[in-house]
Image: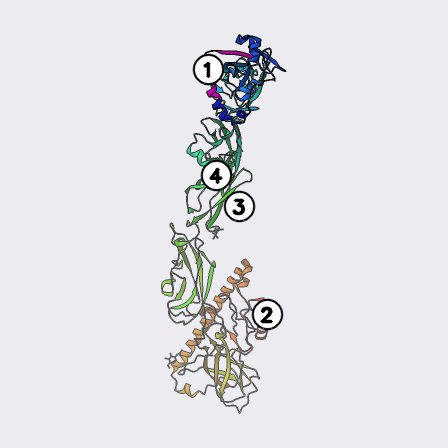
Amino acid sequence: MEASRKLTCRQRQVHFSFFLLGLSLVNAGELRHYSVVEEREGRSFVTNLVNDLGLGQLEFSSRGAKVVSKGNKLRLQLDQETGDLLLTEKVDREELCGHTEPCLLRFQVLLDNPLDIFQADLQITDINDHSPAFLDKEIMLTISESSLPGATFPLKNAQDMDVGQNGIDSYLVSSNPYFHVLTRKRSDGKKYPELVLDRALDREEQAELRLTLTAQDGGSPTRSGTTEVHIEVLDFNDNAPQFEELLYRVQIPEDSPIGFLITTVSATDKDIGVNGQISYSLFQASDDISKTFSIHPLTGEVRLKEQLDFEKTQSYEVNIEARDAGTFSGKCTILTQVVDVNDHTPEITLSAFTNPIPENLPETMVAVFTVSDLDSGENGKITCSIQDDLPFFLRPSGENFYTLLTQKPLDRETTAEYNITITVTDLGTPRLTTQHTITVQVSDVNDNAPAFTQTSYTLFVQENNSPALHIGTISATDSDSGSNARITYSLLPAHDSQLTLDSLISINADNGQLFALRALDYEALQTFKFLVGATDQGSPALSSQALVRVLVLDANDNAPFVLYPLQNASAPCTELLPRAAEPGYLVSKVVAVDRDSGQNSWLSFQLLKATEPGLFSVWAHNGEVRTSRLLSERDAPKHRLLLLVKDNGDPPRSASVILHVLLVDGFSQPYLPLPEAAHEPAQDDDALTLYLVIALASVSSLFLLSVLLFVGVRLCRRARPASLGGCSVPEGHFPGHLVDVGRAGTLSQSYPYEVRLMGDSGTDEFKFLKPILPNFQDHPLGSETGEISNCRNDWDFGIQLK
Ligand SMILES: *[C@@H]1O[C@H](CO)[C@@H](O)[C@H](O)[C@H]1NC(C)=O
Ligand SMILES: *[C@@H]1O[C@H](CO)[C@@H](O)[C@H](O)[C@H]1NC(C)=O
């Protein structure tokens, strides 16, 4: 036996198997069953083999019974005497058999003499000595909130070492509204729990659940084990985004810049993650709105994309959509009110404009215009004005219509052009103003007659002028314009029909130049007057006239003409001189005239030649020939004097006078020893007498005429004292040696004469006329000469006869 124990285990088993095979042949079919409960402390009785085998105690003990167990797992002890089989130590069924049930341990009882082998099983029965246990302390489970009620979620089963009745019997779950648990049995008999959804989950209500899962065995008393089930509810896109407000009201000034933040919309989604990601967009936006507004898809900022214009659109309704990743969306509306800003300047539109406007018209329409402002309210109200100082006014005619009118007749000659500035201002803040200037021309009407630069013209022409001499220019102006101011000059028909003006004067119709057509003769025509006309070319034409007085200036073109003594070679004049004459005796007086006037007619006398020089002297200024000394018997009876009469012209003109003087002894006895008389026919004396008579008659008639004239002039003067001014003192002093013989127009009537009558005594002087003008009395010339023959007035003259 000892030796066999030393054999290896396998050899021993083989050996033992053969051995048993031999024995079993003996006792085949006879297997005894025993059972013992596990975990029994101390020795536990299994059976009494003496009784079981039916052997007597002696026999049993003598046959050397042995118990052999496979693998010696069982600590069995056999009492050789009594045959009791005992288990010497506590056995653990789970250790010996695990989950194998029933747990049978085979052993053999060997008897010698003869060898008998009995087979026996020892069954170790289970007790509930283990609790169910879950492998994991916590079971993680994710369930979508979209799972429908009735959905099942199998869970891992719990373990229990015990078997059979003592194994896991059922599962329980802590009380909750969503789940109950079912205990399911797998094909291998193991039981596992299965969660069944009773009610739909809502992540938004409860995002996770913690349940306690309990596994119970069927032992008595029951044992249990628990684990925690952590259920995470998976989000399902079951919520639509929701805006904080459904209607946003905003007001934006129309001048807000592009990019202006109008408002920020905000929506929330109860879902999480992708399902809660919101993107904003314009909803069903018209072209206008999508052009004008933009929204940031993530932030929800609504901004201006385009300039607003209140005048185009006053409000916008912008619909916004918020959409999550799924199919859900929310809507809101932004009511955008555009606020008017005074951003439009008023405008002026001329619809009618009359230019030029004729002058002299009463209230006349000049322009019609409309004003407009695109703004609204106060911003669009307009006031309209023009300058105050213009003769125009505005008349409102209809809405925003104005008529510009003249206030009164205009005068082109005062103002030919007006700049009218129309100012329109709206009432917004700040005020906006537009100005428009129209220039109105005033057109001419022929309302002004030509006006001469002078009311009368006095032209001076030197006589003996060359024909077609330009003697002066008249000129007129016309304040009209164009043809209304184009002036034509003309000569008007003379009132004096005697004056043949056409032969005297011509006028240049264009420039008013006057020409003397022929040479003028002062002695024939000293002055003449005529009217000139100036006519414009307006329609109707206007004209005016002016007086032109032409004064012909004297030229020294006439030599002095000797009136006395008559200068005729055939009948020389002889003065008689008494031999008894005192010195200073007036022998004769030379009377001469000059048809010229003024200086040209101032005459001076001088003795050129005498047969007896020193006997006679001539007073230069009056032509008196006087004796210078006493006469004596020695003096020749006949004397011939050559005198010169010279005027004061430049150059002077002169005439010579031959004077014969015959000395006589006493006036009553004229000594006439004239040789000429001897051979002169008697007719000569008759002729001389006739001349003297004629001279005397003419002097007498002159005198009479002079008296009449004098009286007439006196009367005339008394009536018109003012006309005294017409007669003026000549400029400068009269040369002492000159005699003015007058410059009257009617020459023949104004020549001063001094006639000494034959036979007159030297003392027979008489004065017909006193000096006419008192002021000439004081005149040095007048007082010196005692003779006045100087007067500017045509009618004033003086005659002194001696
Ligand atoms: C009107 O305006 C024009 C242009 O500015 C100017 O030449 C003209 O002198 C003005 N006329 C008057 C009457 O002010
Ligand atoms: C002057 O003399 C001429 C002749 O020489 C004569 O014909 C004439 O009549 C005379 N004149 C006067 C006024 O005697």
In the rendered image, the vertical position of residue 692 relative to residue 108, given as above or below: below
Assess whether residue 113 is covered by the magenta stretch.
no
Q: Which residues are magenta?
A: 16-38
Q: Nearer the viewer, mark 2 or mark 1?
A: 1
Where is mark 1, residue-wise?
24
Where is mark 3, residue-wise?
389
Residues at badges 2 and 1 in contact (C-beta under 8 Å)?
A: no
Image spot of residue 85 (x, y percent) = 58, 13
Is 765 on the left-hand or right-hand side of 461? right
Where is mark 4, residue-wise?
307
* Kind of residue sitting beneath label 2: Gln
Q: Earlier in the sequence, mark 1 or mark 4?
A: 1
Where is mark 2, residue-wise?
777
Structural crowding at the residue carrying mark 3, measured as other residues with C-alpha within 10 Å and reported as few (<14), some (14–19) or many (≥20): few
Report which quarter residue 544 is drawn in. bottom left
Q: CA distance from mark 3 to mark 1?
A: 156 Å
Q: Nearer the viewer, mark 2 or mark 3?
A: 3
Structural crowding at the residue carrying mark 2, measured as other residues with C-alpha within 10 Å and reported as few (<14), some (14–19) or many (≥20): some
Residues at badges 2 and 3 in contact (C-beta under 8 Å)?
A: no
Image spot of residue 519 (x, y percent) = 39, 70
Q: Nearer the viewer, mark 3 or mark 1?
A: 1
Residues at badges 3 and 1 in contact (C-beta under 8 Å)?
A: no
Q: Residue furthest left?
A: 503
SS at mark 2 in the image: helix
In the rendered image, the vertical position of residue 675 relative to residue 763, given as above or below: below
